[in-house]
Image: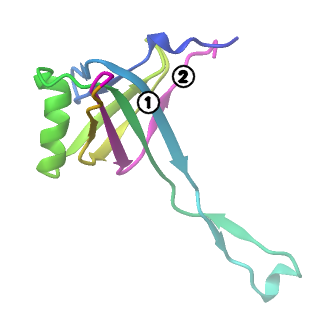
Amino acid sequence: MAIAGYGGGVYIGDTAPVKIAEIGSWSLEPDGPDEIDVTSFDSKGWKEYVAGLSGWGGSFEGNFKPDDVQGQVALINSAINKQIVTLELRVNEVVKFTGKAIIKLPNIEVPVDDKVTISFDFTGTGPLTATLSAGV
């Protein structure tokens, strides 16, 4: 069964995550694991591999809300100060992806004929944890 995206959100923090205000979409981009070639003369003519490093990153964007002190402003400050944050990317109340990440300085777009938007890119550092429900 398909899942509607309107139950999603982006949160920061370890113990009591805070929702980032006005975010309208997020994207998670896992990478890996790398394939490490371990082929030798003993491989009898077949390539052999072991799993190597994995990584993850992504982006999220939404309406710019400069008074979201615990959300958007905190993310901007963590990027300026090069601090690692705990990100929680929620599909809904049950399905989520959590890990430590480096937030890059945001892109802010100010068109004369439309809303002001903000977008963040991030790179995961360490493992990504998936919490999935049995029904998904």
Q: Quadrant of residue 51?
A: bottom right
Q: Is residue 54 left or right of residue 126?
A: right
Labels 2 and 1 touching (C-beta < 8 A): no
Q: Is residue 87 left or right of residue 49?
A: left
Query: Vertically, is 40 above or below 51?
Result: below
Question: Relative to the observer, which residue lies in front, 21 or 100?
Answer: 21
Q: Nearer the viewer, mark 2 or mark 1?
A: 1
What's the amino acid at mark 2? Leu
The residue furthest right is: 45
The residue furthest front is: 112
Q: Residue at 88% across / 81% down in the picture?
A: 44
Residue 128 is covered by the magenta coloring: yes
- List the residue tagged with mark 2: 132
**Label 2 Cα neighbours within 10 Å, binned few <14 / some 14-19 / many ≥20:** few
State the image coordinates of residue 69 (x, y, percent, origin top left).
Answer: 10, 24
* Kind of element beneath mark 1: strand
Looking at the rendered image, the quarter that the C terminus falls into is top right
What's the amino acid at mark 1? Trp
Q: What segment carries the magenta color?
A: 113-136
Q: Residue at 70% across / 11% down in the picture?
A: 1
State the image coordinates of residue 32 (x, y, percent, origin top left).
Answer: 57, 55
Residue 92 is covered by the magenta coloring: no
The residue furthest bottom is: 41
Question: Relative to the observer, which residue lies in front, 43 or 61?
Answer: 61
- List the residue tagged with mark 1: 26
